[in-house]
Image (tube, rainbow, N blue to C red):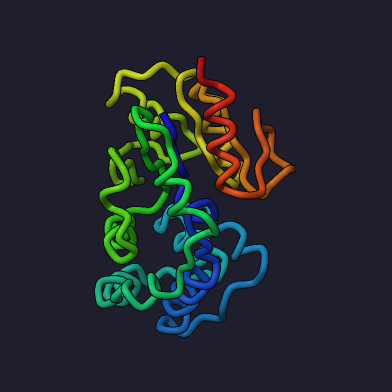
Amino acid sequence: MLILDCDGVMFDSKEANIAYYNHILAELGLPPMDEEEVEFIHSSTAEEGVSYLLERRGFRDVERYRKVREGLDYLPFIRLMRPEPHLRELLQGVPPGVRKAISTNRTYTIGHVLEHFGLKDHFDYVVSALDVSNPKPHPEPLLKVLGHFGCAPREALFVGDTERDSRASQRAGVPFVAYKNRDLEADYYIEDLLDVLEVIRSRRP
């Protein structure tokens, strides 16, 4: 089984995320994010990200924030996302019989993302932060995927790019493939998504 993270693995979504959160901050009359904040929101859930940003600015008008969030159309930000090189080739090249799933800390937006890029039919199962009580780095999202297919941890691979991904993988007992990040603790390191196919082949009997 192959499990992919979304942001930073399937898509370069940094520009989209910066635009999204800075738009919310601007609507609330607050200053834009700094580099440290950009790094935090990259791997957090939306609620974690917003809470972190608002707390750092001492903003406590929850009702005003909710009105801004409810009136926000995410589609313009999805258009700023860019599929990582060779994503489609990877999905098309996965050997028959290998299930494909997503484990992401995104919430309701993951469905819109897959629909917009025509990728919905490439995956057998998707677990978002809305589908679990504890998002990554907790192992629950990965364990949910494994349980859905009755798959043992060592029979799966999880491709991620952040410390949260690495920790979730370790805690779930799933071999971890670090994408474009050699600072992480991982079983495999890749710079190109097509290298995932070689990892899969090396593990098959």
**Looking at the image, which is closer to me, 203 or 15?**
203
* Horizontal side of residue 81 vs 74, given as left or right: right
Vertical placement of 28 versus 134: above or below?
below
Compared with residue 78, is residue 48 higher up or lower down, i.e. above or below?
A: above
Q: Residue at x 36, y 25 (%)?
A: 146
As drawn, 56 above or below 187: below
Say whether residue 193 is left or right of residue 114: right
Name the side, left or right, on which 167 lies relative to 48: right
Residue at 35% across, 45% down: 129
- The x and y percentages for residue 51 are 45, 60
Please tell me in which quadrant of the rendered image residue 119 appears.
bottom left
Residue 154 at x, y percent in the picture: 50, 18
Q: Quarter of the image holding residue 186?
A: top right
Point 30% across, 60% down: residue? 118
Q: Is residue 32 left or right of residue 120?
A: right
Which of 100/66 is in front? 100
Asked which quadrant contains residue 23, the reply is bottom left
For the image shown, how many numbered marks are present on the structure? 0
Image quadrant where one finds the N terminus? top left
Residue sitting farthest toward the right? 183
Point out residue 202 in the picture as x, y percentages from the top left corner. Answer: 59, 24
